[in-house]
Amino acid sequence: MKTIEVVAAIIKKDNQYFATQRGYGDFEGGWEFPGGKIEPGETPQQALVREIKEELDADIIVGDFVDTVEYDYPKFHLTMHCFICELASEHIVLLEHEAAKWLGADELDSVDWLPADKGLIRKLL
């Protein structure tokens, strides 16, 4: 099975987490922490900064490593490195996502998270 290695930004502000809804692909409509694939030669932190700029036109400060999630989807194995991040400014533009929202810890289960992200939610609570 093919392995895809990605990074996810757990963007946190005022005890709320930034969730995005996929606007494309096999998992369109599912909610996730934003991020994407690590390019050759990039560290996970560098990939996060690049991906968030590409997806949200936002600048972030990458903080602490939270976890690496391993998940088997039907067509591939996902390795997802997750970091707490903060926005460098309030500027966010949804360039690839259908929707986004800030969720408090008590609201994290109010959206339909993608399977790999569901395991991460439990670690944040």
Image (cartoon, rainbow, N blue to C red):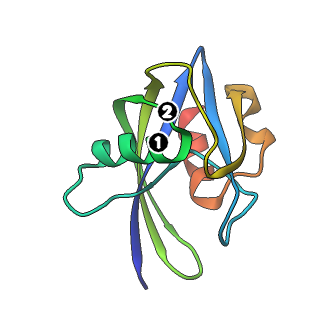
User: Where residue 71 appears, x then y in whole percent?
Assistant: 50, 66
User: Where residue 20 appears, x then y in whole percent?
Assistant: 66, 44
For the C terminus, the quadrant is: top right
43 vs 120, nearest the viewer: 43
Place residue 65 in its image quadrant.
top left
Residue at coordinates 76% horizontally, 58% vertically from top-left?
29
Q: Are marks 2 and 1 in contact (CB under 8 Å)?
A: yes
- Residue 15: which numbered mark, if any? none
The residue that label 1 is drawn on is 52
Residue furthest to the left: 41
89 vs 37, nearest the viewer: 89
Q: What's the distance in space between the residues labelled 2 and 1, CA to CA?
A: 6 Å
Residue at coordinates 68% horizontally, 66% vertically from top-left?
27
Q: Amino acid at mark 2?
A: Ala
Image side of residue 57 versus residue 82, left or right:
right
For the N terminus, the quadrant is: bottom left
The residue that label 2 is drawn on is 58
37 vs 65, nearest the viewer: 37
Mark 2: give few (<14), some (14-19) or many (20+) Cα within 10 Å: some
In the rendered view, tell whether residue 90 sits above or below residue 34: above
Residue at coordinates 34% horizontally, 49% vertically from top-left?
47
Q: Earlier in the sequence, mark 2 or mark 1?
A: 1
Local SS, label 1: helix
Local SS, label 2: loop
Q: Amino acid at mark 1?
A: Ile
Image side of residue 10 versus residue 79, left or right:
right
